[in-house]
Each structure stands twice: as C-alpha cells, then as structure tokens.
Amino acid sequence: MNGFFTLRPGRISYRAGLALQQQLLAHREAGTADFLILLEHPPVITLGSKVKEFRPLAPHDYFESRGIEVIRARRGGETTYHGPGQLIGYPIVGLDLVNRDLHRFLRLLEELLVKLLRRYGISAERLAGRTGVWVSGRKIASIGVGVRRWISWHGFALNVGGYLSPFGAIVPCGLTGVEMTSMAEHLGEEPSIEEVEGQVIHCFAEVFESIHLGEW
C-alpha cells in the first residue's frame, strides 16, 4: 500500500505555497512517498492555463483596493479566488497510483471532497462535465491540477467559511452564472480549518488507499 506525508503550514502566501510544492515535487521525483499539503492563502486571484486574458466582472481597482493579488498559476483550468476560510489541498502524488489516468485522479479528488462533506451532513455531489463539487447547484469546491513527470501538483480549494464576495468579481472556473457556497452556510457555523484538515487526511487515506505516514 502507498503512503503519504502531510504538511500543514497554516496561512501562507500563494507564492510561498508554490515554492513549497516545487520543493516537494523534487523530493517525490527522488523517490519519497506522496505528500498532501493543507493550508490557507491570503486573498489572491489565480489564472489557470486556459485564461489568455484576465477579464474580471469588476473594475481592476476592485482587487488592488482590497489587497487581492492577481497571479498566473501553472495549473489547468480557468480563474478562481483563494482567501482566508478556504482550505487548500495540494496533493503531490505519483500518478502511477491511477495508471497515469488524470481524469480518474480528478474524479478521486471529487470523491474525497464528497465523502468529507457527507461527514458533516452536507449532501454534496459531482456534476457531469463540470469538475468540482456542488451542493444544491452551487459550487463548494474547485479543482485544478498540474502534472510534472507524472506527479501531480496544485489541487483543490474547499470553501469552509470566509468571505465569498470576490467570487462575484470573476467568472469562477470559467462558468458563467455559477454561485458559490460554503460549509458554514450549510452548517450554520464555521468549523475550524484545523478540524476540517484532519477529516481531509482521513478521507484522502480512504479514497487513495494510502497510509498516512505522519507530518513531514
């Protein structure tokens, strides 16, 4: 059975998170076990590989006035927002685990998040043709991954609580008219990020049939 280490650095900048992923990619390429990074970012808009030109729904000074960086990311997908109250998961995983089937890897990430949300009594689901996780037609988690030498990086973003208004200034994941939601909206209170991180680790081990080897 495969194994994975976890890293839980708290709230760090998007660029620091990127540097951490690159360090762990090098370790994984050298033959270590898989990794799962769980963290938060300060407010940031990231642009995926499908975005040729950033065309927000709000004036450009909307982002600067709120201290929201706009960064081009080296992942697939479109535009998304990250901020406090959102749990980010970066799995650094050898894709031989899924026979190098990226589509299957994405579906397993969705399954992980659906299982997690059901632990909290939230009836989440996948929608055919729309990567991510949904609750009553609203999006609660986004997924966008990159692959280097058949090892994944980047990953998923789960809205635990926090401030969702910046999603209204963009077209999230390139899907016009999509409404976002959070765990807090459905639970009536916001669970702690640390608590949700622990549940993610359990669900990751279950879905990927992998042993948690502890903190790195």
Image (cartoon, grey):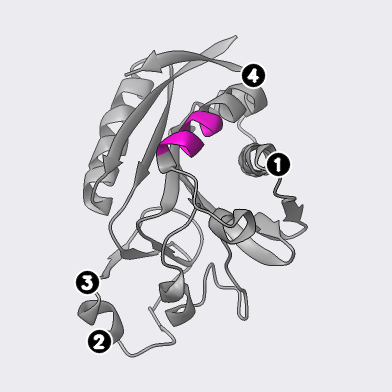
The part of the chain drawn in magenta is 194-200
> Dot 2 lies on which element?
helix
Which residue corresponds to mark 3?
Answer: 67
| Labels 4 and 2: the sequence-earlier one | 2
- Does the magenta stretch mainly form a helix, a strand or a loop? helix
Q: Is residue 95 left or right of residue 130?
A: left
Residue 200: x %, y % from top left: 54, 33
Q: Label 4 neighbourhood size at 10 Å, few (<14), some (14-19), many (20+)?
A: few
Q: Label 1 neighbourhood size at 10 Å, few (<14), some (14-19), many (20+)?
A: few
Q: In the picture shown, does residue 207 fall above or below 176?
A: above
> Dot 1 lies on which element?
helix
Seen from this angle, which residue lies furthest top?
1
Name the disc covering residue 209, or none. Answer: 4
| Labels 2 and 1: the sequence-earlier one | 2
Which residue corresponds to mark 1?
Answer: 118
Q: Amino acid at mark 4?
A: Glu
Residue 216: x %, y % from top left: 32, 19
Which quadrant holds residue 105? top right
Which residue corresponds to mark 2?
Answer: 61
Q: Are marks 1 and 3 in contact (CB under 8 Å)?
A: no
- Judge by depth and name the residue closer to the eye, 83 or 177: 83
Residue 47: x %, y % from top left: 39, 66
Which quadrant holds residue 27? top left
| Labels 2 and 3: the sequence-earlier one | 2
- Judge by depth and name the residue closer to the eye, 189 or 201: 189
Residue in the image at 36% along x and 42% along y: 39
| Labels 1 and 4: the sequence-earlier one | 1
Residue in the image at 57% along x and 28% along y: 204
Q: Amino acid at mark 2?
A: Asp
Residue 115: x %, y % from top left: 69, 37
Q: Amino acid at mark 3?
A: Gly
